[in-house]
Image (cartoon, rainbow, N blue to C red):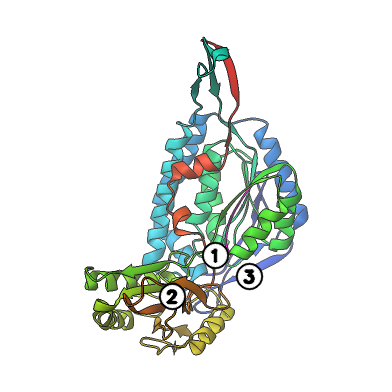
Amino acid sequence: MVAAANEKRLLLGGEWIDTGDWLEVRSPYSGDVVGRVAKAGADETRRAIDAAERAMQNPLPAHKRAEILVRVAAGLGRRHEEVARVISDEAGKPLKAARVEAARAMSTYTFAAVEARKLAGEMVPMDAAQAGEGKLAFTLCRPIGIVGAISPFNFPLNLVAHKIAPALAAGCAVVLKPASQTPMSALLLAELEEEAGLPAGWLNVLVGPAAEIGDVLVEDERVKLITFTGSSGVGWKLKERAPKKRVNLELGNATPVIVTADADVTAAATKVSQNAFAFAGQSCISVQRVYVERDVYDAFVKTLVPLVNALKVGDPADEETDVGPVIDEDARERIIEWIKKTSGEVLAGGDLDGELIRPSSTPSTKRSSSQTARVTGSRRESSRAASTPPSGRHKSSTSVASRSTRRRRSARTRCRTAESRIRAIPARGRITPSAR
């Protein structure tokens, strides 16, 4: 299933360094070692920030930034299958889903390259006030500075691309900390950046303890922006610790679906079965609960359950696999415990297929003004309360065990375009009056 184990050094200041300490990367499916990565700590993080600071002393013009981003997109295209297999090996993501992620990363870089050439300020008329007659102002977009980026395990390539590509498009150097469970994709992407001609120091990739690396990123005043994708608890605490920095958070949510009486029940059930269990539900936009109007509830459940049971669970390297493993044993045990504690009948799954959890769904048995639906597929330690529509309209709330192990970004932030990401991350404006 997995490729031969290989070693990856860290990219720091344009050099691939060996720290003498290594982290093993294991397949979530087989437990085999798929790679070893040099382990970084606080010292390497400070050196990476030094390198990023030096890099930004020689700004890259917009056309150069765009050209580099285009070359990275082309590199992802040339090595598409290799990239997909790295994702699959280290994350346990089914190969067909890993290929989609690789293609999405190509699009991320393509969009960023377009925006690199378009980032500009605005002309502002000043004659709204008498003193402004005959004058105008303009804003200039300038790089905000060094970006500290922290990415999760569930999209080890494209979420890294979401952090690197917009920052580089805007002229910001990056210090990246990918998830320790899935660092191989990020380091492969760093190789492509280097091959594309990105000068030393503009991208630095460190793998290691979040406490050590994250603490330095938060405390060092040279890091002007932190972008974090992960759990709400960690994200909000990080923001509290960095009140003087710009902090962009992409956190988790509850991802409900509402099926109305006039809906196409077959289409709705098909979409729910697909989007609840893709990548074993380890995405914040995996469907976690479904509210169904009374008139179509029975028909919806009757249609959904066979579709869920038909999903193929197995080796993520198998072309036919729909659902692979969750990221680690702790996640698996936690989800099994959630399923055991559910108050509703388990209509699908609820047990193991070897070491893999079968896709599961349970109807809620509770009815109240604050309907509680157990969500067994997110990083919640208890059920969450959700508002119930007007009394009598819904027969039940179906909680889908999507088996995610992390709460990730909200659907709204995840669906933002590359343009909005770029404009959110790097720019600060300056208004300068001038004579018309």
412 relative position to 396: left or right: right
Residue 127 seen in the current view: yes
Label 2 sits on what residue type? Answer: Ser
Q: Do the residues labelled 2 and 3 touch (CB within 8 Å)?
A: no
Which residue is label 2 attached to? 402
* Image height of 391 relative to 188, above or below: below
Q: Which mark lies nearer to you, 1 or 3?
A: 1
Q: Which of 94 and 267 is in front in this view?
A: 267
Residue 197 at least partly seen = no
* Mark with earlier residue (2, 1): 1
- In what quadrant of the picture does the N terminus appear? bottom left
**Residue 394 location in percent, x, y?**
33, 76
Mark positioned earlier in the residue sequence (2 or 3): 3
Say which label, 1 or 3, has the lower sequence index: 3
Q: Would you say the residues marked 2 and 1 are in contact, meaning their CB atoms lie under 8 Å apart? A: no
Three-letter amino acid code of the residue under disc 3: Glu
How far across and how far down the image is residue 308, in percent? 33, 80
**Which is closer to the viewer, label 2 or label 1?**
2
47 lies left or right of 85: right
Residue position for label 1: 153
Q: Residue 244 or 195: which is nearer the viewer?
A: 244
Q: How far apart are marks 1 and 3 (CA)?
A: 15 Å
Task: Report, in whole angstroms, how far the alpha carbon at label 2 lies from the one at label 3.
Answer: 28 Å
Q: What element carries label 3?
A: strand
Mark 1 residue element? loop
Percent across and percent down for residue 260 are 27, 69
Residue 225 falls left or right of residue 157: right
Which amino acid, by three-letter code, is at mark 1?
Phe
- The magenta-colored residue range is 226-231
Q: Mark 3 points at which residue?
A: 24
